[in-house]
Amino acid sequence: MSTSMKPLSGVRVADFTWIGAGSFTTKLLADFGADVIKIESASRLDTLRDGAPFKDGIRGVNRSGYFADRNSSKRSVTIDMKQPAGQALARKLIAQSDVVANNFTPGTMEKFGLGYEAVRAIRDDIVYVSMSMQGSSGPEYKYLGYGLTIGALTAMQYLSGQPDREPAGTGTNFPDHIPNPCHAAFAILAALRHRRRTGQGQYIDIAQTEPMISLLGPAVMQWTANSEVTERRGNQHVAGSPHGVYPCAGEDRWIAISAITLSAWRGLVQVLGLSDLAADVRLLHADARWERRHQIGEAIADATRSWDADELMDTLQAAGVAAGVVRDAAAIVTRDPQLQARHHWVRLQHPEMGESVYNAPAFRMSGAEIGPYSPAPLLGQHTDEVCQDVLGMTKDEIAALTEAGVLR
Amino acid sequence: MIQANGGALDEGTSRTTPLVGALNGLKVLDASGWSGQYCGKMFSDLGAEVILVEPHGGSSVRRDGPFLDNKPHIERSLPFAYFNAGKRSIGLNLDSLEGRDIFKRLVARADLLIESEKPGVMASRGLDFASLSASAPQLVMTSITPFGQSGPFAQYDSEDIVTLALGGLLYLGGYPETEPIAAYGNQACLAASQFAAVASMIALHAGVASNAPSGRHIDVSIQECVVLAMENAVQFFDLEGTVRKRNAGHQRQAGMGVFPCADGQVYFMAGGIASNRFWDGSVQWLLDEGVAGAEKLKAPEWKQAAYLATDEAKKLFASIFTPFCRTRTKAQLYAEGQARRLPICPISTPRDLLDNRQLAYRNYFTSLDHNWSGRALTVPGSPYQFSETPWRMQGPAPRLGEHTSDILSELSIAPERQSVLLKAGVIQ
């Protein structure tokens, strides 16, 4: 029998990450019990703290919802890393940590005196992860960008969209949200396992382009093995028909349907009352449905237009057809019965923002108490607490460093 | 010193033992399909021993293209070859009593089981977590399903595009004038694989760290994985009451978006993200190049978000930048813009990736043998570089049932009994 516990309790992370991919990496650890201490600076703010949306639309370093969701369960200390005394504090914190994480441009940590070799001198078995845009060295290692340009550089954007229009991508900084944080968190946990077994720490270098490309293996191989460039195909990603996104009643309402098996096809034409298609025995053949996919797609769209999207989804599912409403943000937060039943949305009380919505992790784990345990920290909220509890400093020492502008 | 292949160079010393991956010694059973096989690959590439348990006729991923030489065949699927590199394959019918028995014996030796059956299917076979962990208390079982094990949609049918829809990412993709367009490449399933890998490692960590090894069941919802890709759309609704929409084919704000060039397109963020940090540098670039009209971009309104959001600003920017852009290649714009520390990137095609000098420097692409054809295929390599514990594909993807007999022999099932099981349709 396992008892409920925070699975990563006992792991401490000295967290120098900021903005998107880095902050989400350490959130994945914090929401499972790691003590993630975010080292911030009032003079060099995490730009996500200044990123919309803001509570009530009012800008403020403690009011960004984007920042909040990506930094749940963490503690924040403010240290001026430009001052030698600030760097000395960071070294003390690292000495008490298992993991050091950053996603700066290469060279930034070295400027603080906190490159891997320097950190290793403080704590030999540290797991040190750097996740810059293009890796720690090479002809383009200093090139800059964001999730959007990484999506472009990695071919993700090229591959997504309509064939006759400009590449669409995902419409988001996709690599920041899934590929990079998941790969980085997995790498950290794997390195911690190795350390547990051997006592050996290590350096992990992640280029934020590479996890994304690793998810595009089949498109890479279509070129390297077959000398063909994979082109955009709209929503027709699978070798089967019908498969696509169709309009529903209301403004900008849509449903995704995939009915490529015979039984799903029968269910679909019956629910939509497509009697002509249902009577066409040639369409009982998968290859005929493929040949006539454009005609079929138009017939489906004509029929779905008058349906309420949720009602159509439920009716199609009851008939054995894979169908899902295209949820917008409002619907997903307020009206998705599945996410509600799974308690995906967690409302946390934040000292300045009041109650706001956070994502629960994408998975549940038996015998574990999982987060988010606390809302995003205020800038420097835990400076005194960490200095006392983790670094063993006295109140006088803390006051002196605050006075000197080292802690701010 | 870090080598590109992830091995460490200790100058002046020589190693007497070969480097092993960080997950060396872990035993993983991968009984999954599209939503879990990349998870199994992540474990295998760091040194875990991964057995792919395939149903009768083989994994469904074998039926997805593209196929080698465009010849559809279950041994020529490129996705299968990629996502299952380094695994061993056993063909095992879990709907037979004998197959379940063998499966339980494999579970008894495993640290981790990855599976993606519809909720209830494993229980109907007596292979749910409660049953398995009774005789395998160490087991971490990671179940990946479209909507999770519980809730009103748990039994709903799905496809990648269905979970992209219900997970909110689909609505953000595509052009305002057309239906939403899904991300390429089964990204919902792959997102689930990645979160499953993280979840599994957390559970394995907890099992060891708690000093009382205890199994855990992980319940991954693909829908919830997709929700985490919604960026700030959820918070925009929650905090400001606005619903983010799709915007492909248009500049997000003036100076930010896709622009056509001589040999394709580039993505340019003239101001940066939600700020104007790079604006002056971008304008200076155009001035230095003598671009007609660039002077206009120096006016103060170009620093105001409200102006950048107008159609007038977007049109004016495009009318100035695009003619210049069309005179340059992707590579030229990338090099020239980045030399000025501006956020610009090519819209790479898959082919371009193989010509990317930064990826080449890092030895990112690697060679993977393909069993059936005897060819060596160039594939994406290490997504992370470890200084001490190398990332390494352990070998080609298996043929269907390639290791069935070896694995059964390891369970001390004699060849004669194996032939009975093959004849009875239990193994393949």
Image (spheres, grey):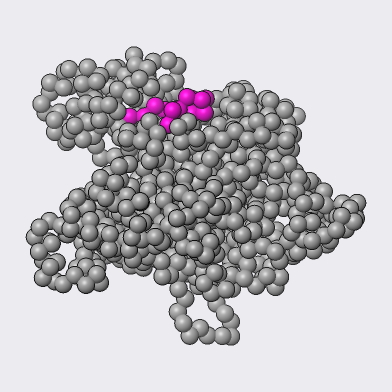
* Residue drawn at point x = 41 percent, y = 70 percent: B25
* Residue drawn at point x = 65 percent, y = 40 percent: A375
Asked if residue A321 is among those painted magenta in the image, a careful observer would answer no
Left or right of A20 in this view: B64: left
Res. B425 in view: yes
The location of residue A321, given as percent across then percent down, is 27, 30
Residue range in magenta is A323-338
Left or right of B341 in this view: B372: left
Q: Is residue B17 above or below residue B381?
A: below
The location of residue B196, given as percent across then percent down, is 43, 50
Quadrant position of the N terminus of chain B in the picture: bottom right
Asked if residue A326 is among those painted magenta in the image, a careful observer would answer yes
The location of residue A360, given as percent across then percent down, is 53, 40
Q: Is residue A216 above or below residue B206?
A: above
The location of residue B109, given as percent across then percent down, is 33, 66
Pick whichever, A33 or B370, lies toward us. Answer: A33
Pick whichever, A157 or B77, lies toward us. Answer: B77
* Residue drawn at point x = 24 percent, y = 69 percent: B411
- What is the quadrant of residue A285 in the picture? top left
Res. B65 in view: no
